Amino acid sequence: MIIPTILSGGAGTRLWPLSRQAFPKQFLPLLTTETSLFQSAVLRLEGMPEVGNPLFVCNQEHRFLIAEQARSVGITPTAILLEPAGRNTAPATTCAALRALRVDSQAILLVLPADHIILDAAGFQAAVAYGVPAAAAGHLVTFGILPRHPETGFGYIRAGAATSIPDVFLIDRFVEKPDLATATRYLESGDYYWNSGIFMFRADAFLAEVEQHAPAILKACRTAVDKAAVDLDFLRLEAKSFLSAPNISIDYAIMEKTQAAVVVPMSVGWNDLGSWNSLWEMGEKDAQGNVISGDVVALESENCYLRSEGRLLATVGLKDHVVVETSDAVLVVPRDRSQEIRAIVDHLNRTGRAEPRIHKRVFRPWGNYEVINVAARFQVKRITVNPGQSLSLQMHHHRAEHWVVVRGTAQVHKDREIYLLTEDQSTYIPVGVKHRLENPGKIPLEVIEVQSGSYLEEDDIIRYDDPRA
């Protein structure tokens, strides 16, 4: 059985301000309004034979995002492994392989980054099918992308001799990101492929290579999985053991050392979406070469990426730039310098700004809330509660709350009262009163909450009953 293994640990800082630590790029619908990159990573495998339920590896901070995005497209994971902190792809994949063997002793892992785009799903499935016999035979398969142009932002793989398996080649060597002249030679030679970071191998074969080339990783991960704790729908890797694993990628730890590595070439419209310029390259352009998303007016502007998440964005005479508007930040940068956005994020982190870390929308196991307005002594939020879910039974010492239902049906617990509210109805929760908000309906409940009081931070809360904290 093939177990798709989705690695979702990246922060996507080069796509700030849309991608942030608490809501990184893999959970955003960057090229479509329908599915996120994470959802697409699984959905593009639909219809393939012998493909089982996926296994997810993610940062514990993103656990509810993962669970909700999977649920919303009908995906039931084999497991969701929670990392206490990022340790790169080698430890993450090792933990996934150890877990997969408990499901199927012959499991083949198809390791997929959660934040890549592949436009040709059928072509990708065909490439995976070419790799299956090699993986089943004990090879560690990686997938090389046929280069479309000289690219200095990707690593490369140089293919060696053909194997006895059609469309599968030995790997001569891995190459670091080259300069432009070197990348041009690679393209002209026809022997080099972009390193996609996608892998396929038998779980037991991979673990044998880890034991040989990176035994410290295997030891740490085996203990982390053995001591993992079940938490709701998640499996929390034991922190001390996992954090003792070296922070290293699969390429450095295993693929560059093993004699079992092979490559399957493919041309499937792949991109790792590592910068705003990548989104411009992949996006649908107007007659002036602009890629436009949202409420945008572009006059005499050419070859720009222009994105508005809310307010009107207008440009005049702009060329070769990226402009991105969100509710709390605006980015303006030349397209050819969009790789440098990480420097902005680093600066904001050093100065203690919240914008690199959080959006105004915060996800919780019951749904999410979005801060609409904040001022002295009041705050306005939009709360969305998923069907059948409820907030904790709680109380606040310093703030009162007014709830107005704008969609769905709310069941309100207020001290010893329990009552229903429907659309356009409201209620008031005084300071010091125990309360709970529930959604007993079949559609999402949306509530506008107005908080008033002397202290409005999230730590002013006493929880009495929180089954999904």
Image (cartoon, rainbow, N blue to C red):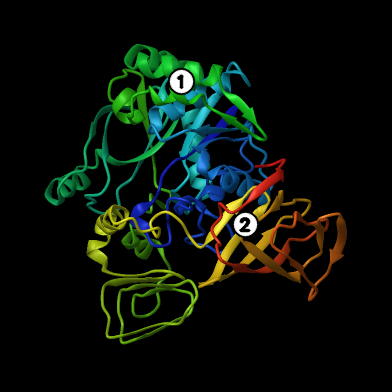
Percent x, y for residue 157? Answer: 27, 35
Res 85 → quadrant? top left
Please identify the quadrant where the C terminus is shown: top right
Which one is earlier in the sequence, the residue at label 2 or at label 1?
A: 1
Please identify the quadrant where the N terminus is shown: top right
Q: Decide if residue 463 is on the left or right side of residue 336.
A: right
Q: Amino acid at mark 2?
A: Asn
Q: Amino acid at mark 1?
A: Cys
Q: Is residue 275 visible?
A: yes
Q: Decide if residue 361 is on the left or right side of residue 283.
A: right
Question: What's the residue at 53%, 21% (across, down)?
Answer: 225
Q: Is residue 138 visible?
A: no
Q: Which disc is residue 221 wearing?
A: 1
Percent x, y for residue 172? Answer: 24, 27
Which type of secondary structure does the marked residue at label 1 adopt? helix
Q: Which disc is residue 191 wearing?
A: none
Percent x, y for residue 320? Answer: 26, 73
User: Can you identify the residue that label 2 sits on?
Assistant: 368
Question: Could you tell me how far apart the alpha carbons at marks 2 and 1 are, in whole angstroms?
Answer: 33 Å
